[in-house]
Image: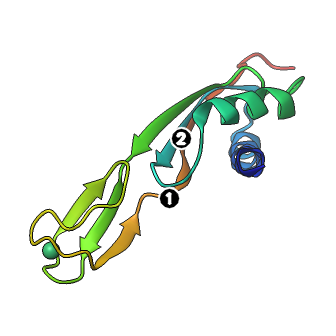
Amino acid sequence: MHELSATQNILRIVMDHAERNHADSVSAINLVVGDFANIVPDCVGYYWKIITEGTIYAGAVLHFDRRPAIFECDDCGSQFEITREMTACPQCGSDHVTFISGDELLVESIEIVRNEKEK
Ligand SMILES: [Zn+2]
């Protein structure tokens, strides 16, 4: 499944960050999801619960910040957003357009909890 491997990637990034910062738990994870990434946030949340069960990551809340896809017109150079279906350039009507961004799934930041008490 697409979302399962995406969720595993998120977990790897979060684990790396949490370990370097000596986190005792992770409270929230802020993700950036492009509209063309084909990611269903609910699926990621579902897999997150499964693969983090019993770990310090299990309680983290996932926040999804959706970004529209950006295209650039090959003819007039204007950039525009596409949220659903492919459209022609809104400036000149050309359908020669190049995909710029919007298929990303990024971990923007994570919020960790550290227990200050000495063990
Ligand atoms: Zn154009």
Point out the frontmost of discs 1 and 2: 1
Residue under the image location 74 percent in, 25 percent down: 25
Find residue 87 and report its image quarter. Answer: bottom left
Q: Nearer the viewer, residue 111 or 48?
A: 48
Q: Which mark is residue 62?
A: none
Residue under the image location 71 percent in, 39 percent down: 18
State ligand 1's quadrant. bottom left
> Is residue 57 in view?
no
Amino acid type, residue under disc 2 in the picture: Leu
Colour scheme of the picture: rainbow
Q: SS class of the residue under badge 1?
A: loop
Name the residue tied to disc 2.
31
> Is residue 47 in view?
yes
Amino acid type, residue under disc 1 in the picture: Asp
Name the residue tied to disc 1.
103
Residue under the image location 76 percent in, 26 percent down: 24
